[in-house]
Amino acid sequence: MIIADDLGVGDVRYLQRGTFRTPNIDRLARESTAFSNAYVTAAVCSPSRAGLHTGRYQARFGHDFNPGNAKDLEEMSLPSGVETVAGRMKRAGYFTGLIGKWHLEGRRAGASPLERGFDQYFGFASGGSYILNPRDGDILLRTEGEPAERTRSQGFSRMGSPVEIDGYKTDVLTTEALHFLAKATSEERPFFMVLAHHAPHVPFEATKAYLDRVKHIRDPQQRVYAAMVTALDDSVGAVLKDLDRRGLRDDTLILFLSDNGCPPYIARVCSNAPFSGHKRDLGEGGIRSPFLISWPGSQRGPPVYKQPVISLDLAATILGAAGLSDQLSDLDGVDLARYVNAASQTPHRALFWRAGTDLAVRRQNWKLIQVDLPEGGRRSFLFDLKRDHGEQEDLSGVHPALVRELEAEWRSWDARNIPSRMQGRVTTTRIAGVEVQARY
């Protein structure tokens, strides 16, 4: 499973004919089923990853937000009673490894990747620099909210012990992923690997080698961002090439997605097109994701699958591929292998989102969002995504009965959840031209 960080659906060529060349992701798309109605469970990193790693809506265990204060940092730890996909795979005899970002380890014991099902871990909790020691020709740009003095740290840990790496973070993670594959192959063990990149999340940092490949882009910020996406794409290519070389490609299920959409503070250079909204809000741009599943040697699905799916489904799909279908009963996702060749079947009656008091539900083509207003009170928005995927025409006043029906369906879903254990933060954004508050 390869996870990009803050990669918008408009930032890859197989979805949009944009500025950035992504030949390796495009190749993977050609060898995959591409899901054109794919979502993640949250518009920010930590709760999205909580859902992804467990196969359960993170609201089930109150993980609604990124940490907003010291108490939230404690609560960010994945609760001990919540099982991960890695834990299930490890029990089944798989060699499990996480390379890259975890973002589910707070300040409580028992929440490190090594305690949550991974045999090997090399990575970082969250954030940090891409380049420890900048060299001539490297570019480091500042973006909104960054401190005046940037700490030169990548915050890496290997098997629980801090290590300092002198190299470009994306390349370092790729090298470690290839080492993991080599170890699994040499020991002839089935493996489950998560390669969770930081790219193209801020800070904007790129080496000369990648910048030279995007010289055609004149805007400095867009050029650095394109270089970061290029490094991410190279990483996908390196993994594919290594699996090919080892003769493992046909026997390896590969999944690719982003943890959420690209953020508003770099919206000038990244893209969630054709959707409105960004990271931090429940607009389509915040929760839509590139989403690929490739398994050449097994059942092949159609090139494009159009029914709505969600990142929760990856856990069930992985377990199903491993012959562990008896472990799906407590998951909220479904094994997509059972649906991709049956286009008339819908994997989910409805999909749900919760970020504190913010809520959203999608059923068929209809999507309801409810959020607070800056001046007080709440506002409902209803969109017909078939006609209006940019969420510009609010139909809540036209279909009040449908609003009430979707509200009731969301409340029935939420009755199985617990209140958020985290406080999170609040920002101001716009939905269909209306200024609203978004919790993240």
Image (cartoon, helix red, strand yellow):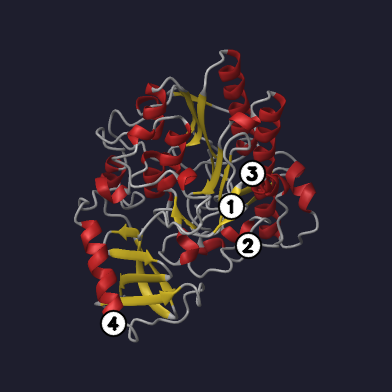
Amino acid type at image mark 2: Val
x then y, percent, for residue 387: 51, 77
**Circle nearer the N terminus (1, 3):** 1
Q: Is residue 104 above or below residue 214?
A: above
245 and 79: which is toward the camera: 245
Q: Which residue is mark 4?
A: 400
Residue 142 visible in rendering: no
Asked if the residues shown at circle 1 and circle 3 are in contact, with their CB atoms under 8 angstroms apart, the answer is: no
x then y, percent, for residue 4: 55, 46
Q: Residue at x 65, y 31 (%)?
A: 249
Give SS at disc 4: helix
Numbered badge on residue 34:
1
Give the quarter of the figure containing the C terminus.
bottom left
Q: Nearer the viewer, mark 2 or mark 3?
A: 3
259 and 148: which is toward the camera: 259
**Circle nearer the N terminus (1, 4):** 1
Q: Which residue is mark 2?
A: 269
Asked if the residues shown at circle 2 and circle 1 are in contact, with their CB atoms under 8 angstroms apart, the answer is: no
Label 2 packing within 10 angstroms: few (<14), some (14-19), many (20+)? some
Give SS at disc 1: strand
333 and 187: which is toward the camera: 333
**Circle nearer the N terminus (2, 1):** 1
Cα–Cα gap, marks 1 and 4 = 35 Å
Quadrant in the picture for residue 293:
top right
x then y, percent, for residue 327: 33, 34
Q: Is residue 145 above or below residue 1?
A: below
